[in-house]
Amino acid sequence: QVQLVESGGGLVQAGGSLRLSCAASGSIFSFDINVMEWYRQAPGKQRDLVAGITRGGSTNYADTVKGRFTISRDNAKKTVYLQMNSLKPEDTAVYYCRVSPYYGNAYWGQGTQVTVSS
């Protein structure tokens, strides 16, 4: 069993910042983890990729968050972070982390709500 526990969501005013964390635990070793990603899903919309990071540190971002969000990871702690700055109301969504091992299926977190007020 693998568990992903997300934290750091909440309510913030436009222009503010939040930092999300997602820690993996259970039957997965640090060296098993390849890609770690953040997705988000707004009400009535599909779940979209926000940012991803490989074990080696290569990153990719959705165009809508480039320059505002930064993804990072701590391999020893099996944790991925998402630093979100200059937040906008359109960033409001449930944010999910996804962890992909080198072998086998990916795992999803339970989601954390981010609400940005105007």
Image (cartoon, rainbow, N blue to C red):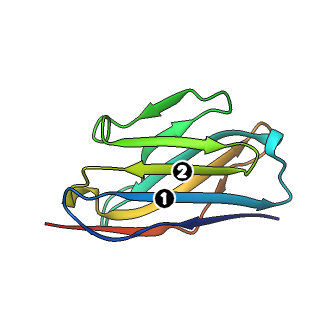
SS assignment at label 2 = strand
Q: Is residue 25 left or right of residue 118?
A: right
Front position in the image: 79 or 40: 79
The residue labelled by disc 2 is 81
Q: Earlier in the sequence, mark 2 or mark 1?
A: 1
Q: Quick one: SS at disc 1?
A: strand
Q: Along the line of sight, which residue is nearer the eye, 60 or 107?
A: 60
For disc 2, the neighbor class at 10 Å (few under 14, some 14 to 19, many from 20) is many
Q: Nearer the viewer, residue 28 or 19?
A: 19
- Mark 1 packing: few (<14 Cα in 10 Å), some, or many (20+)? many
Assess whether mark 1 and mark 2 are in contact (beta carbons under 8 angstroms): yes
- Across and down, in percent, residue 17 comes to 32, 57
Mark 2–mark 1 Cα distance, whole angstroms, equals 5 Å
Question: Mark on residue 78?
Answer: none
Three-letter amino acid code at the position of disc 1: Leu
In this rendering, would 14 be left or right of 94?
Answer: left
**Residue located at (48% from left, 59% from top):** 20
The quarter of the picture where residue 75 lies is top right
Residue that badge 1 annotates? 20
Is 88 left or right of 65, judged from the image as shown?
A: left
Quarter holding residue 35: top right
